[in-house]
Amino acid sequence: MQESSPLILNIESATDICSVSLSRGTEILSFRETQETFAHSKVLTLLIEDCLGEKNIQLKDLDAVAVSRGPGSYTSLRVGSSVAKGICYALDKPLLALDTLKSLALATYAIEGDADAIYAPMIDARRMECYTAHFSASGDRLTDTAAEVITENSYSNIFKSEKKIIFCGSGAEKCRSVLLSPLAFFSPIVCSAMYLPPLAVQTFVEKRFEDIAYFEPEYFKAPNITKSKKKLL
């Protein structure tokens, strides 16, 4: 293995759809995705099996496992991280935890190509709320991650400065109807294991490996658990 071309299994489980890719360096060797929502616990290991099987590669052949670390769906992130940690623990492989929002921003820039724009990836939360942050075209983080309720006044200070913002991710589309500035642009890019390899390779080369025993995804917010209204007998 060349250090710049590691064989990595990439797991994206931050949203309602999960996907898996196998990559050599930044090249995608195989890819699997399910369109069944919130089926992660049922299909994730099957997607991994299919992805590896297509190239006749076994888990022991991997150089590392990369997982999208969030923010995102609490349950979905737990499934993805648990599977990734299990593989790494059993086979003594490095675990790479990738910033979900940063991977979206980098993927969007790779397609849009606007070096002067601000990139605002959005993960759909409840109602008009999104997990979001701002990034430069090079992937530098400009703001901390926040859970924001999007209104027609959101980003007004940036728009007043004549700065273009490119929104992407699962939360972007629902914000299109309220963000009406001509400087607001919307990309169809959403979370996918297809977009993880560049960040995974960078993390691997820099040897930023996670402690498998202590790693937890960045849930950002606790799960929305409601109490049953049924009366106990």
Image (cartoon, rainbow, N blue to C red):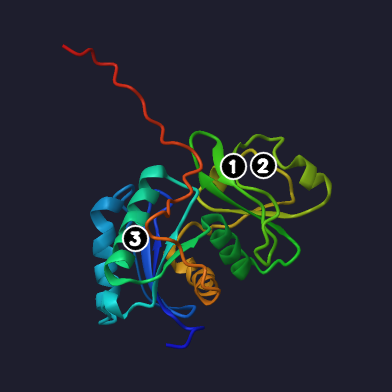
Q: Residues within 10 Å of mark 1 (few under 14, many from 20)?
A: many
In the image, residue 37 sits, relative to residue 67, either above or below, namely above
1 or 139, which is in the foreground? 1
Percent from the top left, x then y, of residue 37?
33, 48
Q: Secondary structure at mark 2?
A: loop
Q: Quadrant of residue 175?
A: top right
Query: Which residue is depicted at the point 37% across and 61% down?
Result: 19
Badge 2 amino acid: Leu
Q: Nearer the viewer, mark 1 or mark 3?
A: 3
Q: Mark 2 sits on what residue? A: 179
Q: Quadrant of residue 137?
A: bottom right
Q: Nearer the viewer, mark 3 or mark 2?
A: 3
Q: Secondary structure at mark 1?
A: helix
CB under 8 Å between discs 1 and 3: no
Q: Residue furthest bottom?
A: 2
In the image, residue 202 sits, relative to residue 147, either above or below, namely below
What is the spatial separation of the Cα atoms under label 2 and label 1, in whole angstroms?
6 Å
Percent from the top left, x then y, of residue 173?
55, 47
Q: Residues within 10 Å of mark 3 (few under 14, many from 20)?
A: many
What is the spatial separation of the Cα atoms under label 1 and label 3, in whole angstroms?
34 Å
CB under 8 Å between discs 2 and 1: yes
The earlier-in-sequence mark between 1 and 3 is 3
Percent from the top left, x then y, of residue 39?
29, 50
Badge 1 amino acid: Cys
Q: Mark 3 sits on what residue? A: 85
Q: Secondary structure at mark 3?
A: helix
Badge 3 amino acid: Lys
The earlier-in-sequence mark between 3 and 2 is 3
